Image (tube, grey):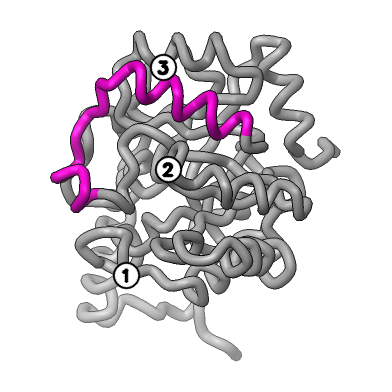
Amino acid sequence: MQSRVTTSTLMKMKQDGKKITALTAYDFPFAGMLDQSGIDIILVGDSLGMVVQGKENTLPVTMDESIYHTSMVSRACSYSMVVGDMPFMSYHGSIDKAVENAGRFLKEAGAHAVKLEGGAAVCPAINAMASSGIPVQAHIGLTPQSVHQMGGFKVQRDEERLLQDARDVQAAGAFSVVLEGIPSAISAKITKELQITTIGIGAGTECDGQILVLHDAIGINDRFLPKFVKKYADVAGVAKQGIEQYIKEVKAGDFPSKEYEYK
């Protein structure tokens, strides 16, 4: 049996030139599938607000909702590193409250690390969490929690700012950084310069690893898909076919047949 992925595992993978795999999950069944498949990182993203709650964006997701979903995911995993995504305004106030909220992911939800969005502005929080023994994954570039401030979901092209944000979060103590919505040439420069791992989403192939939203990648989400999403399966199509067959058989009186009845 493979040992669990840790921050040290990820660092060695970068050093050895081995790509890191990551996907999101929000519940026990899907997390179990990912863990058994050998995914390195499972992010319990605040994308749950849009993916499983049907909301317009990630902003309404609460700490209690995040803890609830992360708990389900953690219980399913023996190999994958589970990262809890800190929701909007859970780390923007006092540093003490930010550390307390981050600690809940490890104490109550069984996560192995937390993720938060932002560059230089959130470095004091990253430093305080890391100093308290909480592994932190940073997230720069297109940061969905800042969608209103950014004026929408736009590709981020300010190379100087992005490089500095990457340097800052590394210096603050982050063990990894997600690069989202960044031209591949800039992501390549960041990845080459940093000692910590870079995980890309819409950031090109030169990142140390890649992450996608699970429901996008396996064809459950039937809403708009960003340019960077590759659809690897059509789970919704298969499920719909099965559901329609079930409806047909029940209405025709063909299910349950004798083989499904108790004697």
Q: Residue at x 65, y 68 (%)?
A: 100
Query: Quick check: can you spot residue 104?
Result: yes
> Residue 46 at x, y = what percent?
42, 58
Residue type indicated by callout 3: Ser
Q: CA distance from mark 2 to mark 1?
A: 18 Å
Q: Residue at x 16, y 44 (%)?
A: 152
Image vertical order of residue 237 relative to residue 248, above or below: above
Q: For the residue carrying disc 1, how many other residues have a C-alpha within 10 Å: few (<14), some (14-19), or many (20+)?
A: some
- Mark closest to the chain's N terminus, 2 or 1: 1
How many marks are shown on the rendered structure? Answer: 3
241 relative to 42 in the view: left or right: left
Q: Secondary structure at mark 2?
A: loop
Rendered image quadrant of residue 103: bottom right
Q: Secondary structure at mark 3?
A: helix
Q: Secondary structure at mark 1?
A: loop
**Residue nearest the viewer, comparing 240 with 25:** 25
What residue is pinned by disc 2?
118
Residue type indicated by callout 1: Pro
Q: Report the mark closest to the observer, 2 or 1.
A: 2
Q: Which residues are magenta?
A: 147-171
Query: Quick check: can you spot residue 75?
Result: no
- Mark closest to the chain's N terminus, 3 or 1: 1
> Residue 214 at x, y = what percent?
42, 45
What residue is pinned by disc 1?
60
Numbered mark located on residue 187 in the image: 3
Q: Is residue 160 magenta?
A: yes
155 relative to 63 in the view: left or right: left
> Residue 80 at x, y = what percent?
68, 44
